[in-house]
Amino acid sequence: MSAKKTALTVLSAALLIPSVLGVPAHAVPAPPADGKGGPAKAPSAAAPPASMSTVGGSLLGQPGTQVSLLPGAPSLPANLSGRSWVVADADSGEILAAHNAHWRLPPASTMKMLFADTVLPNLPKDRVHKVTEEELSGVGSGSSLVGVKEDYEYSVHDLWLGVFLMSGNDAVHVLSAMNGGVEKTVKDMQAHAEELQALDTHVVSPDGYDSPEQVSSAYDLTLIARSGLQKQDFREYCGTANADFPGKQGAGKARESFGIQNTNRLMTGAHGMAPYKGIAGVKNGTTTMAGSTFTGVAQQGSRKLLVTVMNPSTGGGNAVYEQTSALFDWGFAAAGKVKPVGELVPPKSEDTSSYGSPAQSHEGGPAAAGAGAGGGVGTALGVAGGALVLLAGGAFVVNRRWPRGRRGMGHG
């Protein structure tokens, strides 16, 4: 594959901890859903549960918008209609604002972030695999596909590009087979989610295909993305805008390839959506039950933010990207001018404190969907405002650090 076909965001990292003094956090009621002109929406109740998980802070277990503005802080964007969203500092893990952060909702293909974070370390990227008919037989009807064909060989690197750029469920199922099968992969993903303390998440399929029991939350998806961004290969794949993918091979002829483009519209500017300055990934998804979901990471200056938006109820096909962009703008302007309302907790193996309890143990059965509703670094290409910019050295890195003041957050 030509290096010119791979676009990676390459930026430096820094930590800036916001002030901890300010006015009390407050809850803003969720905006009503008008059901007009928006993407497909989940058929569950419009209101979040009255009681949700308090992992990451007691305020995150309350319904509605949680934000604590200091003097000079900008107001949150108007017309936010996502059923759940989170704005977090990617380095410190401090949550600047959130709305129904722990509402367990269908995740669509954002579940592929957990799939990648779980499986990537297990499969060498240069390993080549010949695809069988059986490996593709479990791909759900209507799935997004990259075009993997039986009896053809693909490298693990190629398959991951298919997962991240085209959200290819066919590539997910082949990689799952290479990981020991779909059933094993689902178990691995669930175990990894629980290690990350992503306790709202229940995995049914590795690709995020609709199932009444497959759920996650804006909080969990943000936590999972932050974990994935610790891995160089994850950053590479989720930050790739365009690539070549292996195609057909005729008798006596060299194998053909075809171009694929990332479906992340904030990266590519597709469908009339302006590329977002400093965007570096991560993953989008759309299904009938989930509506549109998106988790993104972006950097401006030394500040890196993670934003997750789940199922906007108003707006057109770009609504999830428009609302993510608006929350990025707010977060970059508000950083240092808000009191954090919670935090992204450490993995269980690195955690020495109790961070609250999940809304429901997975051992007791999952909630229904909507219930209550690293190697070395070389020269790379960066995506900034939609243009490809050659940057010198380094790579986009999220330096995951645990907030110093976390015991004062009120974990409930």
Image (cartoon, rainbow, N blue to C red):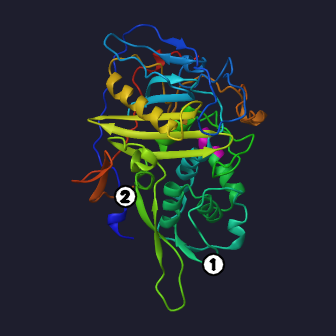
Figure quadrant of residue 289: top right
Q: Dominant secondary structure of the magenta stretch? A: helix
Q: Determine the residue located farthest toward the bottom in the rendered image.
A: 252
Residue 49, position as x, y percentages in the image? 69, 21
**Which circle marks residue 151 in the picture?**
1
Q: Nearer the viewer, residue 353 or 164?
A: 164
Q: Residue furthest left?
A: 392
Depicted 93 relative to depicted 186: above or below = above
**Dot 1 amino acid type:** Asp
Which secondary structure, mark 2? loop
Q: Which residue is outermost to the front? A: 36
Quadrant of residue 59 within the rendered picture: top right
Q: Nearer the viewer, mark 1 or mark 2?
A: 1
Residue 278 drawn at (x, y percent): 32, 42
Residue 17 visible (yes or no): no
Image quadrant holding the N terminus, namely bottom left
